[in-house]
Image (cartoon, grey):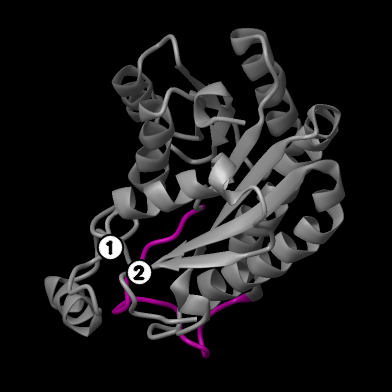
Amino acid sequence: MELKDQVVLVTGSSRGLGAAIAKAFGREGSRVIVNYFQNEEKAQQVVDSIGKDHAMAIKADVRNQSDIETLFKLAKNHFGENITTVVNNALVNFQFDATNRKTAETITWDEYQVQLEGSVKASLHTVQAAINDMEQREFGRFINIGTNLFQNPVVAYHDYNTSKAALLGFTRSMAKELGAKGITVNMVSGGLLKQTDASSKTSAEVFTMIRDSTPLQKVTSPEDVADAVLFFASPWSRAVTGQNLVVDGGLVMD
């Protein structure tokens, strides 16, 4: 299915990487659901930038199954078609703050639980809400947002890194089961992005270090990652599933 024919849900897309992904799909003519949890104003700004004929904002807590089921119904009523493509991007209550991060001595299981629910539980909800419609169409795309930190934890963000490693296991397990239904499940893993709300507490010195250590000699932007997400939604990736594409300028080579 061409990008222009897809109905795309991007979770957590009122800001940062999610907003860049939503706008990238909008640029290609997709119809886009801009999901938000707290900031309706920013979500509406993303909708306005895409165009109201091709985008709508829906509030939903990705950790709440009922919220997600309602979102899918609202999207179908609005666009007249089921969601074909899901980007699981939402990030729950996390800052990339290397100075004030929780250490092995101070982190709690509850903090792990928050990130696991934001990554794996939320992705399970979108898969289960979409699977029947995608199977009937014999087409579906899931793109989960990961991180290069679970392969090279240069900063030990214990809860975040672990949740994204778990999300890769989820990605590959779902790819195995859903492939026969015409549904692909892949992951795109960026590095530390310059700059989003989540990376706003990262110092200029850290970004300089990343740039100098990266073969492409640049810090990856949200737009760089967004374009890679488009690949996994496009017909060009029709024979690709269960993969993790690292988009960080070559900093981590897998």
Residue at image coords 34%, 57%: 198
Compare residues 183 and 22 and report the one nearer the observer: 183
Query: Could you say which is closer to the camera, residue 104 or residue 175?
Result: 175
Q: Dominant secondary structure of the magenta stretch?
A: loop
Between the residue at mark 2 and the residue at mark 1, the CA separation in whole angstroms equals: 6 Å
What is the number of the mark on residue 248? 2
Q: Please give the name of the residue rendered at 66% of the width and 30% of the height, measured from the top-left corner.
A: 84
Image quarter (top left, top right, bottom left or bottom right) of the N terminus: top right
- Residues drawn in magenta: 92-108
Q: Is residue 231 above or below residue 209?
A: above
Q: Are marks 2 and 1 in contact (CB under 8 Å)?
A: yes
Residue under label 1, please give it: 220
Is there any visible trace of residue 244 in the rendered image?
Answer: yes
Q: Position of residue 39 (x, y in %)?
A: 40, 31
Q: Where residue 208 sits in the image (x, y, percent)?
A: 14, 76
Q: Quadrant of residue 41?
A: top left
State whether residue 215 is above or below residue 57. below
Q: Inspect the image, locate mark 2, and give the three-letter code of the amino acid beneath it.
A: Asp
Q: As drawn, is 213 to the left or to the right of 111?
A: left
Density class for disc 1 (Cα within 10 Å; few <14, some 14-19, many ≥20) is: many
- Relative to 157, is 51 above or below? above
